[in-house]
Image (cartoon, grey):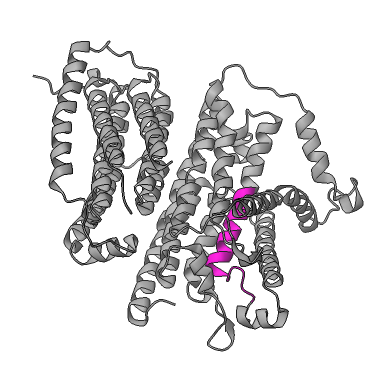
């Protein structure tokens, strides 16, 4: 490996990661305006044109506020909490595919930080670490509400990891690979002449399970039991000051973005446009890098769609009760996941993988 | 892939040290939960040995054994912690010294 | 480079594992346990077993230690006063373990040939194939075992409720 390679890879990694972080300010305004749109009110529209500078104002507000930390907390774990939530959310970005290849100096580079052959296992493994930040942060706050929020978050995330994993197993079976990149590669072209060759048509039930579990994993409404403001003040981040809260906030949006990117890669064809194969596109565009740009744009559009769905669901569906949440996971989603797995196994045993 | 011999030695060092630490924690600590954690340490020491041997000799048996060990360990922890919770409900403590009703 | 990483991960794992045994507060023990599992996962990666490294994080760190932390926090334990350990006992136990393990490990290193020609190209595929062919029966027994464990846990945690006429906690 030459030094130019190292520089290109470093720059590529920085661009992909920083691009993912941009989700946070964008979602800040999208969520508030989206809520306002659904509730039929104007929303934040004073700062800049159409209120577009609202995120900057919010961030400045958070930065300028006095940092308060309660006296009776366990200092080390209290300070560690927000970072333990943000770190896994950031690490997942490494395995997500955003495009095929781009060429620079007559060499081609993947538009993905690391092409892991156990990509989906990596994502599930790192994703399951996000609990620790909530758990340690909530416990260290030395507050009953925080502790209850942390406990709820743990039982919820552990429970919903099972349907998530079962849905992922179904996908792994149908693609015959653990690598996210290979999964996306398999979704090119058309299916039965009319449909796009996307994973959702092979795994409709799996996608439904994955979609529901994704809401629970990211602690979003209708499953935001860890931070129900009506019961628990603010749940696990009750005792946290301005920027610590901001870190939790960032982690939540990063998690949403990575979950959306996962759904796009596994079930919605990743960087492929529906129906059109890459070879046709390359012929039409004539340039590898133009194709790469188109692929990245496709992924961004697909991710944005899912982010909008997250916002839409949040302001439409009321919150579950905790026992309902648990019943949904253990009595409905897990049996469905097992059934999905068995059916998939049977079909692909007789037919062979995609 | 070729593995230098020092990697094997360092692995064995970790295996032995972890196993010894786990055994000592198992024998000396009074907190039932920490005792369970020490058992996990011992199991993981053995896992490392199995994986190291398996990778060094290019065989798969060790890794399959580790898959079984991990599954059993998960179940063991779940049952162990359920018992600890019940003990706490009965005695109000998880100190091992308080659980001696079966002592002759 | 690889050997340096190996030494670093080894020492990190040992340090974290001693943290598990030595810390007074069980919450810190659990935290050290997480760190030591990360160290082990790194060692697995260096040995080339990506699959086991991921399984280590997914199952041990992501599920088992969460259970530990959950129970510790649920019970909200005070620190239990430990007897100061008998140093002679500690010394004897460690020395015995070191002695026997080193002998066993040395024998193990010698007994197994270090250069087998068959190299699994796709480790995951090999493992899965073996699990469903040669090790099918252990695998099936394991699933039965898991079912028994679930029933056992249910019986243990719900026993009092059932004896009290099924009242809810």
Compared to residue B29, the image places residue C38 above or below, namely below
The answer to which quarter of the image holds residue C127 is bottom left
Side of A205 relative to B12 (left or right): right
- Tell me if residue A43 comes above or below residue A111 in the rendering: above
Q: Assess whether residue A330 is covered by the magenta stretch.
A: no
Residue A110 quadrant: bottom right
* Between C2 and C121, the one nearer to me in the picture: C2
* Residue A318 in sight here: no
> How far across and how far down the image is residue A140, in percent?
53, 26
Describe residue A321's horizontal placement relative to residue C64 as left or right: right
Q: Nearer the viewer, residue B83 or C53?
A: C53
Q: Tell me the quarter of the picture where residue C93 sits.
A: top left
Residue in the image at 29% along x and 33% along y: B14
Residue C108 appears anywhere in the view? yes
**Residue positioned 20% across, 67% down in the render:** C133
Residue C160 appears left or right of C98: right
**Residue A309 at x, y percent in the picture:** 66, 61
Q: Nearer the viewer, residue A286 or A345?
A: A286
Q: Residue at x 20, y 16 (%)?
A: C91
Quadrant position of the N terminus of chain B in the picture = bottom left
State whether the magenta stretch is mostly helix, strand or loop: helix
Region of the chain picked out in magenta, as a range: A254-273
Outermost residue to the left: B104
The number of discs equals 0
Q: Position of residue C19 (x, y in %)?
A: 37, 24
- Give the camera-side residue of C16 and A152: C16
Q: Is residue A50 above or below residue B11?
A: below
Q: Residue furthest bottom?
A: A193
């Amino acid at each position: 490996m030459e030094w130019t390679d190292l520089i290109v890879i470093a720059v590529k990694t920085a661009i992909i990661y920083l691009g993912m972080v941009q989700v946070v300010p964008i979602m800040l305004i999208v969520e508030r305006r989206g809520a306002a749109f659904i509730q039929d009110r104007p929303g934040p529209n004073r700062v800049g044109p159409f209120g577009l500078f609202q995120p900057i104002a919010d961030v400045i507000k958070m930065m300028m506020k006095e940092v308060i930390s309660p006296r009776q907390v366990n200092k080390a774990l209290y300070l560690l909490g927000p970072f333990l939530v943000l770190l896994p959310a950031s690490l997942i970005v490494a395995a997500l595919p955003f495009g095929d290849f781009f060429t620079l100096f007559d060499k081609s580079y993947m538009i993905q930080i690391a092409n892991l052959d156990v990509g989906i296992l990596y994502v599930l493994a790192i994703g399951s670490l996000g609990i620790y930040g909530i758990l340690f942060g909530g416990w260290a706050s030395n507050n009953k509400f925080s502790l209850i929020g942390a406990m709820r978050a743990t039982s919820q995330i552990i429970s919903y990891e099972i349907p998530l994993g079962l849905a992922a197993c179904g996908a792994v079976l149908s693609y015959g690979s653990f690598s996210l990149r290979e999964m996306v590669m398999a979704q090119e072209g058309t299916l039965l002449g009319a449909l796009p060759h996307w994973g959702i048509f092979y795994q409709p039930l799996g996608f439904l399970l994955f979609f529901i579990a994704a809401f629970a994993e990211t602690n979003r409404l209708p499953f935001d039991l860890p931070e129900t403001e009506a019961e628990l003040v603010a749940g696990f981040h009750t005792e946290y000051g301005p920027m610590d809260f901001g870190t939790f906030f960032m982690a939540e949006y990063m998690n949403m973005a990575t979950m959306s990117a996962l759904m796009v890669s596994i079930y919605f064809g990743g960087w492929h446009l529906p129906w059109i194969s890459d070879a046709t596109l390359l012929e039409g565009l004539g340039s590898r890098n133009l194709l790469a740009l188109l692929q990245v744009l496709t992924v961004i559009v697909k991710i944005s769609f899912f982010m909008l769905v997250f916002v839409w669901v949040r302001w439409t569906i009321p919150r579950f009760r905790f026992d309902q949440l648990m019943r949904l996971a253990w009595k409905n989603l897990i049996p469905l996941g097992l059934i999905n797995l068995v059916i998939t196994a049977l079909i692909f045993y007789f037919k062979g993988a995609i | 892939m070729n593995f230098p011999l020092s990697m094997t030695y360092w692995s064995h060092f970790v295996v032995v040290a972890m196993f010894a630490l786990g055994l000592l924690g198992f024998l000396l600590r009074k907190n039932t939960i920490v005792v369970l954690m020490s058992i996990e340490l011992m199991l993981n020491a053995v896992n490392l040995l199995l994986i190291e041997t398996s990778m060094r000799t290019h065989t798969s048996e060790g890794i399959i054994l580790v898959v079984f060990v991990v599954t059993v360990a998960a179940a063991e922890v779940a049952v162990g912690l359920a018992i600890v919770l019940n003990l706490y409900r009965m005695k109000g403590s998880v100190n091992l010294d308080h659980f001696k009703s079966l002592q002759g | 480079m690889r050997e340096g990483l190996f030494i670093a991960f080894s020492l990190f794992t040992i340090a974290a594992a001693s943290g598990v045994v030595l810390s007074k507060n069980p919450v810190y023990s659990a935290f050290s346990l997480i760190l030591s599992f990360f160290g082990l996962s790194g060692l697995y990666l260096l040995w080339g077993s990506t699959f086991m490294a991921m399984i280590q994080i997914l199952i041990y760190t992501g599920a088992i230690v969460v259970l530990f932390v959950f129970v510790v926090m649920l019970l909200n334990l005070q620190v239990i006063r430990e007897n100061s350990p008998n140093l002679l006992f500690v010394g004897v136990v460690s020395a015995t373990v070191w002695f026997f393990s080193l002998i066993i490990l040395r024998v193990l290193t010698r007994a197994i040939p270090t250069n087998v020609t068959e190299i699994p190209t796709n480790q995951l595929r090999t493992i899965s194939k073996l699990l469903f062919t040669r090790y099918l029966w252990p695998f099936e027994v394991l699933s039965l075992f898991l079912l028994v464990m679930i029933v056992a846990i249910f019986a243990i945690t719900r026993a009092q409720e059932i004896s009290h006429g099924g009242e809810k906690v």
